[in-house]
């Protein structure tokens, strides 16, 4: 029956097809939830004889997009050659030559700015400079990577269609959300300010601060708790809600609060949880999507649903993860928006952690909407305006004003704390006070110094004038924290290692490099990234800095690809994967050991160890992989040769020195079998040898 594109996607497709024909490059920048992938599928459908090289961050993202296309009435395009960016970066030149694409699609093309993935993409584009390239993304800017514009870098600024999130809401492509700001995070903030006020030495400052603290306390007492907020604003009490968390530990902590927070909505809510490194994540996600029960359904997630993956019937999202990344923020709130949602079906977004204060927030979406409204009115296209505003339930406005006043009051004690810092400097010769250091007068000098560093770095809100910075500089203030200095030391070692070796695949057991244990540090970072812990240390900026010097987060996946391509080279040279156990290729890859371990992994898929994926098994099957033990394979090959010889000559009276045309020492093999036969051997082999007369004839 085919797929009829929504009007905005149809226009984007037509513009992209025209730009590809004229310019050879076209980028489509549309918000999450607008169905960008359908534009690329339409291209594949309209060009059925063209070879389309489709690149994506993960096979899972592509599969979910394909499922959505098929659910809309489309058929699986038979002309797509799919590759992940990770696989592309490992491909050899001869393999790139074999692709011969008529079109290249770069899905989530902002991800091509990463060092290793970007290198693979650039090699592909250099191999096929005349091949048209279509890019899809919700954003073209890598905000935390020097504001790099990937539309300029990859598409020479050729943008076929661009739409902001605000524009999509104004035009009714996406329904305006109901945005609820809660006071959940204000309680912790109040406790921090209470500690600061308690440590203020000035009696007047403490009295003034106590006045605002009391006002805040009363305001928080009157405010609804999260249980009531969810009860009041969850428009669909049996709907599906995505709950974004900061880390695995944080997710477990938040799941534990489900009975308290959601009992008013549903006494028996159904809880699901996924994160990208969980082997069961795909199955858990599928169960959540298929759940049509009359219960509240909550999917707790860390990073798996940030991009490319959709749930059609999401009733809302709950933001429990503070984020400074505009890309992630857009992707998370976009999970509640969909171009397929009927008019009036407004999703609800619960901003529990005040993301509204960050770099890109719902306030920015409102600004985008107003800009779009002015644009369409100025062009005389007011009929395109469907929504001019959306509703924000703001329960924190008064509290934020009180917090600002409280901060100003406590700021009056800066001079006192500076004088305390001077005294510390006179005694110790530096300002390296431990974070928990408290003076005899109960002044938290260590905490204050740490706060000054964070204020200057923009990590927390506050005022620190240039004059104050200069005065602290006179005392030898080191503005980076000990944690930051640790980072700089290890990162410098990582940079040096990369310049010397071309990668960051440092052996964990013997990973000393200079005066740092670089291998252990990199292993810890991979653990942090995989589990979602220590996000204050492994920030998005640091992740991008590491990726810029070749950091591989999933070493097993990387090494598998490396070994696989060594297997491809072996197959191209020898025509098989009958690799001797001790074989090492010219690049130092222990291919024989890897082949043996891979066979073992396949035979023990249910052992709980690392498993081979269906894709990996299929790729090895394409190379003629023999999955049984190599010794068995060698024996079976020799046995088949013995059968042929007996059929041709009528017996197995073979000279010991006899060698077959393909180099098999069949004479020696027969003698060995007779010796083994007389000493005892495997019953199955004994039976097979008896069938051809071994053991019955003399040597």
Image: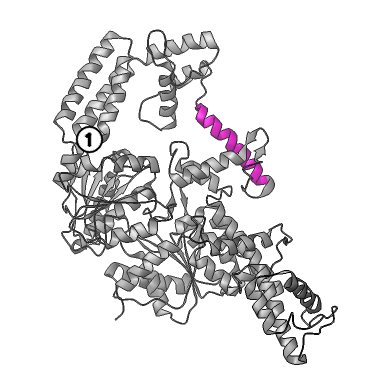
Percent across and percent down for residue 535 are 43, 39
Identify the residue under disc 1.
183
Q: Is residue 121 visible?
A: no
Q: Is residue 76 above or below residue 406?
A: below
Q: What residue appears at the point 45 percent right and 71 percent down from the top-left corner?
A: 20
The magenta segment: 479-499
Q: Could you tell me what secondary structure mostly forms the magenta stretch?
A: helix
**Residue nearer the viewer, 416 or 85:** 85
> Looking at the rendering, which quadrant does residue 15 occupy?
bottom left
Percent across and percent down for residue 95 are 61, 70
Q: Is residue 124 left or right of residue 6?
A: right
- The quadrant of the picture occupied by the N terminus is bottom left
Percent across and percent down for residue 233 are 16, 47
**Residue nearer the viewer, 659 or 453:** 659
- The quadrant of the picture occupied by the C terminus is bottom right
**Residue nearer the viewer, 121 or 253:** 253
Q: What residue appears at the point 57 percent right and 56 percent down from the top-left corner?
A: 558
Q: What residue appears at the point 81 percent right and 85 percent down from the top-left corner?
A: 653
Give the image's coloring scheme: one colour
Kind of element beneath mark 1: loop
Percent across and percent down for residue 433 are 49, 18
Q: Is residue 95 left or right of residue 178?
A: right
């Amino acid at each position: 029956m085919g797929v009829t594109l929504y009007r905005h996607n149809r226009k984007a497709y037509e513009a992209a097809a025209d730009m590809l024909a004229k310019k050879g490059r076209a980028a489509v920048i549309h918000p999450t939830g607008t169905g960008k992938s359908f534009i690329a599928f339409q291209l594949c459908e309209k060009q059925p004889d063209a070879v389309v090289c489709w690149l994506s961050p993960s096979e899972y993202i592509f599969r979910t997009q394909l499922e959505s296309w098929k659910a809309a009435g489309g058929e699986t395009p038979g002309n797509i050659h799919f590759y992940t960016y990770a696989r592309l970066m490992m491909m050899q030149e001869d393999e790139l030559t074999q692709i011969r694409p008529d079109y290249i699609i770069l899905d989530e093309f902002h991800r091509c700015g990463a060092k290793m993935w970007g290198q693979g993409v650039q090699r592909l584009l250099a191999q096929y400079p005349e091949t048209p390239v279509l890019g899809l993304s919700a954003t073209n800017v890598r905000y935390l990577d020097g504001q790099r514009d990937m539309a300029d870098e990859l598409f020479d600024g050729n943008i076929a269609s661009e739409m902001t999130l605000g524009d999509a809401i104004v035009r009714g492509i996406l329904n305006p959300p109901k945005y609820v700001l809660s006071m959940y995070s204000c309680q912790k903030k109040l406790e921090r300010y209470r500690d600061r006020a308690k440590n203020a030495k000035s009696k007047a400052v403490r009295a003034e601060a106590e006045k605002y603290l009391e006002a805040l306390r009363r305001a928080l007492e009157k405010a609804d708790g999260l249980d009531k907020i969810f009860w009041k604003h969850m428009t669909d009490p049996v709907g599906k809600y995505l709950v974004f968390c900061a880390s695995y530990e944080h997710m477990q902590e938040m799941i534990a609060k489900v009975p308290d927070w959601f009992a008013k909505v549903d006494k028996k809510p159904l809880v699901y949880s996924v994160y990208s490194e969980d082997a069961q994540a795909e199955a858990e996600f599928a169960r959540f999507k298929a759940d049509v029960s009359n219960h509240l359904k909550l999917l707790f997630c860390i990073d798996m649903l940030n991009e490319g993956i959709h749930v059609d019937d999401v009733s809302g999202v709950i933001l429990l993860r503070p984020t400074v990344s505009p890309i992630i923020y857009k992707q998370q709130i976009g999970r509640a928006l969909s171009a397929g949602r009927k008019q009036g079906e407004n999703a609800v977004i619960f901003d529990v952690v005040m993301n509204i204060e960050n770099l890109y927030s719902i306030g920015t979406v409102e600004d985008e909407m107003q800009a779009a409204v002015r644009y369409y009115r100025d062009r005389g296209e007011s009929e395109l305006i469907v929504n001019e505003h959306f509703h924000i339930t703001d329960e924190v406005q008064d509290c934020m004003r009180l917090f600002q006043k409280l901060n100003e009051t406590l700021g009056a004690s800066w001079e006192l704390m500076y004088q305390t810092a001077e005294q510390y400097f006179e005694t110790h010769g530096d300002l390296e006070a431990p974070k928990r250091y408290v003076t005899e007068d109960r002044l938290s000098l260590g905490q204050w110094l740490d706060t000054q560093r964070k204020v200057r770095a923009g990590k927390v809100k506050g005022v620190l004038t240039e004059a104050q910075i200069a005065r602290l500089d006179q005392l030898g203030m080191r503005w980076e924290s000990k944690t930051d200095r640790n980072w700089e030391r290890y990162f410098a070692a990582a940079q040096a290692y990369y310049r010397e070796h071309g990668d960051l695949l440092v052996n964990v057991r013997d990973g000393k490099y200079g005066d740092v244990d670089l291998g252990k540090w990199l292993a810890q970072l991979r653990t942090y990234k995989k589990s979602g812990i220590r996000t204050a240390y492994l920030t998005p900026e640091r992740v991008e800095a590491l990726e810029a010097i070749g950091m591989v987060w999933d070493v097993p996946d990387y090494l598998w690809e490396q070994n696989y391509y060594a297997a491809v080279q072996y197959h191209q040279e020898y025509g098989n994967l009958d690799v001797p156990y001790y074989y090492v290729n010219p690049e130092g890859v222990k291919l024989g050991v890897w082949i043996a371990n891979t066979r073992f992994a396949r035979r023990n898929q249910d052992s709980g160890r690392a498993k081979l994926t269906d894709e990996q098994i299929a790729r090895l099957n394409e190379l003629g992989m023999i999955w049984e033990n190599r010794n068995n394979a060698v024996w079976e090959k020799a046995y088949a040769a013995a059968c042929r010889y007996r059929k041709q000559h009528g017996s197995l009276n073979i000279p010991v020195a006899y060698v077959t045309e393909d180099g098999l020492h069949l004479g020696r093999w027969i003698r060995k079998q007779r010796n083994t036969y007389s000493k005892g051997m495997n019953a199955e082999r004994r039976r097979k040898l008896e069938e051809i007369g071994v053991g019955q004839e003399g040597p």
